[in-house]
Amino acid sequence: GAGVSQSPRYKVAKRGQDVALRCDPISGHVSLFWYQQALGQGPEFLTYFQNEAQLDKSGLPSDRFFAERPEGSVSTLKIQRTQQEDSAVYLCASSPRQGWNSPLHFGNGTRLTVT
Amino acid sequence: DQQVKQNSPSLSVQEGRISILNCDYTNSMFDYFLWYKKYPAEGPTFLISISSIKDKNEDGRFTVFLNKSAKHLSLHIVPSQPGDSAVYFCAARRGSGNTPLVFGKGTRLSVIA
């Protein structure tokens, strides 16, 4: 399909495990965003890439969270030593222009459950 | 501190009637507002937006109204249809587009046939 693709759809991790979440943005989209959505809450910003450059990581909650987009296309969000409070849906979005000047196209998310 | 507030967690409306979803914001620097719609197990999809230089934007059955002095916006859906049943998120950003989009907690709309 032509949309934003995220994998896996569901991930269960034991506390202390490392996880990696993948995002395939829409082809040609310059900007890529990661959001975290806890149960009953709205999406909260984590980090933003313009091509391969991570221009804003102000929303990452701790140094256990790391994101990369080495070739300016696929992105990976890595969470080290997962904690129960990391349980959430992680949403990836992309947009064709730089910055926040066009509506974001979201993927279906990865639901992470830390037990 | 929540900068974008959707104070009604849920709303039920009969099919054919008007649905009005409300959103308040606290940051007076916000100048662009969007509404997203989300079905279960899917990501949010963009619905409609409005710039702070306008007070109304209309797209088919969907109209967004902005009251800058009250820091309030609303989404009107008329007539409401069962397929409109979803969670609606209000979002806002400020400046030239280099700051993150901030979302509210969402309002779950149920349109009853």
Image: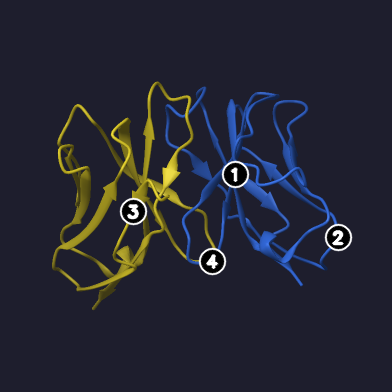
Chain colours: A blue, B yellow
* Location of residue A5 in the rendering, given as x and y in whole percent from the top left corner: 64, 47
Indicate the position of residue A59 as horizontal and vertical percent values.
59, 41
Decide if residue B10 is on the left or right side of residue A2. left
Q: Which residue is mark 2?
A: A17
Three-letter amino acid code of the residue under disc 1: Val
* Tag 1 secondary structure: loop
User: Viewed as shown, does residue A89 lie left or right of A18?
Assistant: left
Q: Amino acid at mark 2?
A: Gln
Q: Residue at x 48, y 24 (%)?
A: B98
Same chain for the residues at labels 2 and 4, yes or no?
yes
**From what the image shows, is residue B55 above or below residue B103?**
above
Residue A16 at x, y = what percent? 85, 61
The alpha-carbon separation of the residues under discs 1 and 4 comes to 22 Å
Eye-nearest disc, 1 or 2: 2
Chain under callout 4: A
Q: Dot 1 corresponds to which residue?
A: A4
Q: Amino acid at mark 3?
A: Lys
Foreground of the two, B26 or A94: B26
Along the viewing direction, whichever of B86 and B108 lies nearer the viewer: B108
State the image quarter where residue A87 is shown. bottom right
Q: Amino acid at mark 4?
A: Leu
- Please determine whether, in this image, residue B2 is positioned above or below residue B58: below
Which residue position is annotated with label 4? A39
